[in-house]
Amino acid sequence: MPEEDRCSFVIPRHAVPVGEEGLSPLQEQMLDAPEPVRIFSAPTGAGKSYVFQVAMRKRGARILFIVPTRRLAQNLAEGLRQDLLDVGMAEDQVLERVCLWTSDEGRRIRAEDPKADVNRRRIREIRMEASLPQGGLMIVATPESVAHYLLKPAFTQGGADVQSIVDLLRLDHVVFDEFHTIEARGMGLSMAIATFLAQDATEAKLTFLSATPIDLVTSLVHFGIPRESILVEAETVVTGGPEETVGMRAIHGDVTVTFRRDGSMVEALEAFRREIIETLSRPNDSKAGQVVLIFDSVRDLQTSKQALAAWFDGIGISWAERLAISSVDDSTDLDLNGLFVVGRAADPLKYRVLIATASVEMGVTFRAGMILMNPGHDPCSFVQRIGRVARGDMDGQVVVTSFRSEKSEPGWYSHVRRQLLAETPVVSIDRFIDCVLDGARARFDVTEHDLDQIDGTFRKMPQSAAWAAALFWCAMEEGLVRRGYKGIRTTLRNYRPKKAAAMAAWLGELGKIELHSAQNWRQAFLQEALRLRMIAPAVSLVDPDGNRRKVPWHIWASDERLSNMPSRLLDNGGIEVSIPMSLEQALSDLSYDRRVRQREQILLPHVGETPLLEINRLVEGCLTILRKAERDHLKAEQRTAREIGERLIRLTRIVPTFEGLMDTANSNTAH
């Protein structure tokens, strides 16, 4: 095939050196490096999260392990619990040593006992010491649950002590897994914790893990962490066959990556029928015996189910061997009545075929020998997906298909494809990651001068993340003061980074203004520290038999058939929709009848108006309103409130909403 027509390349087999304990040099550093803040990168499959399970089980370490999604948190906790049961530990001890902090787990606890106080239960878990004679504790949590723990303090049973960030000093490790996926607000949470743990008062260490090496040092140092307190290391990866990597642990075998354009995923399946059948014919315990399909769109996955089911039926793969993983499919525990098995309780390792969306990118365990996938939403997701195939010393294949129905491909994807195919047919793993992540690194590429500015509109993630960290710090202080516990607040104030001090001064000035609008805006702005990402209202479809499934808001709103069905607003802000047909029929017939834009009701600091703005232009729209108000005839207090509000929105890219103002009474029960 002429080079200009080439559509594939190979990422050759690669491995890592291992020591006597079976750990690589990087894994040993993860456990032993003395620096309080560590940033480690290694390819998917190198055992970044596994090493902390080893630390808990064999070294008695106490770990808070923070992951991006509820699905991943649940999978990690369940896997670790099963490992402990398998080595003979009693079930009650296992449940004490492996804790899960997610909103789903909170709802499960309250369903079992409506009087249960989830926050106080978490206080007991993080402070658990005497009841663990064998040592070791791992709390697997989402960022939102950690934020609620730190920002919504509750007194302990005796009333003499209160939860706070000081509880983290009891731990050996606080780990942020796949940190590159975190938005600026979530990065603010991690930066605030890192700054506190970087003090000399504790042995606790904070670790950032990622398969995609991105610079964080500039931002962390600027926020207040000494450069000598930060360690940055990457895994040593050796490309070569078994004879060239004797004594090493293989991460992946040879992986062939092919680029295509297809009319549908079924068309791509048909083009690789022989390879798919060969992969699925491998033994059930094969580490590369699954075929995985990954869609960019939940809608595409749902509307393709019938055709996909028919195709797999045609090659002898029954519905019981097929699992669907997506935000819709995981909104139930387990359902065995459809074209695919669905539900968050299903173990992906037990199925021969997985169809999924981006929820499988980060840590969901499977045994893929072949992946057929859409390109992903950004370069990082592209790397994550390809890294899920051929784990261990196995060869594998990835087919990347962009559908012809899409008017254009993402610019980053076209650039990456051209660049990779312009090189030799063999691309090392280091070169592959470096090429793909060129675009992603640009979001983090800032200078000290950039971070020093307080003028202009900050668009790069580290700029707004540093100020989001300042907001988070002030919100921690505020929560302690409201509860009347000023001792720990004084400790936090003594450790305040300079940006947090500046944020506190502006919020203090705003707090002195005797305007209801200014006070409401300040309260809502502090409340925004709890919201680490913008999440649309949950929409639940309920069929005539009472079966229920959640769908993304934009799918419901853009489908005229669904949006015209009877609905009601729930107390938690969600929407419940009654449908006259089965869930399977409703989800297989999804359409895109109209373009919709989610809107939020925002607050203004200088007047009591609450305009509605499109959520994807919330910052720009609010700043436009505030700048226009500069020409209005405002009173002195209104001018000050407007000026402070505009500055804080520019710095953090956070706009307080009316929902945020109202979302105080029930926030503890949400997570």
Image (spheres, grey):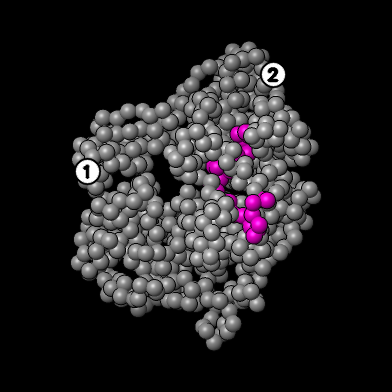
2 is higher (above) or lower (below) than 642 = below
Position of residue 561 measured from the top left corner of the image (x, y, whole percent): 23, 36
User: Residue 152: within the magenta?
Assistant: yes
Residue drawn where x is 65% and y is 40% of the image:
469
Q: Is residue 268 visible?
A: yes
The count of marks equals 2
**Horizontal side of residue 172 vs 299, given as left or right:** right
Q: Quadrant of the image for the N terminus?
A: bottom left
Q: Which mark is residue 135?
A: none
225 is higher (above) or lower (below) than 435 = above
- The residue that mark 2 highlights is 512
Secondary structure at numbered mark 1: loop
Residue drawn where x is 21% and y is 46% of the image:
585
- The residue that mark 1 highlights is 582
Residue 602 vs residue 30, the one in the foreground: 30
Position of residue 219 measured from the top left corner of the image (x, y, whole percent): 67, 49
Residue drawn where x is 23% and y is 40% of the image:
545
Residue 22 vs residue 196, the one in the foreground: 22
Position of residue 619 measured from the top left corner of the image (x, y, whole percent): 52, 33
Residue 671 vs residue 85, the one in the foreground: 85
Secondary structure at numbered mark 2: loop
The amino acid at mark 1 is: Ser
**Horizontal side of residue 116 vs 581, given as left or right:** right
Mark 2 crowd level (few <14, some 14–19, many ≥20, 10 Å Cα): few
| Residue extent of the magenta highlight | 129-154
Position of residue 195 measured from the top left corner of the image (x, y, whole percent): 71, 46
- The quadrant in which residue 208 appears is bottom right
60 is higher (above) or lower (below) than 298 = below
The amino acid at mark 2 is: Lys
Spatial separation of the CA atoms under disc 1 and disc 2: 56 Å
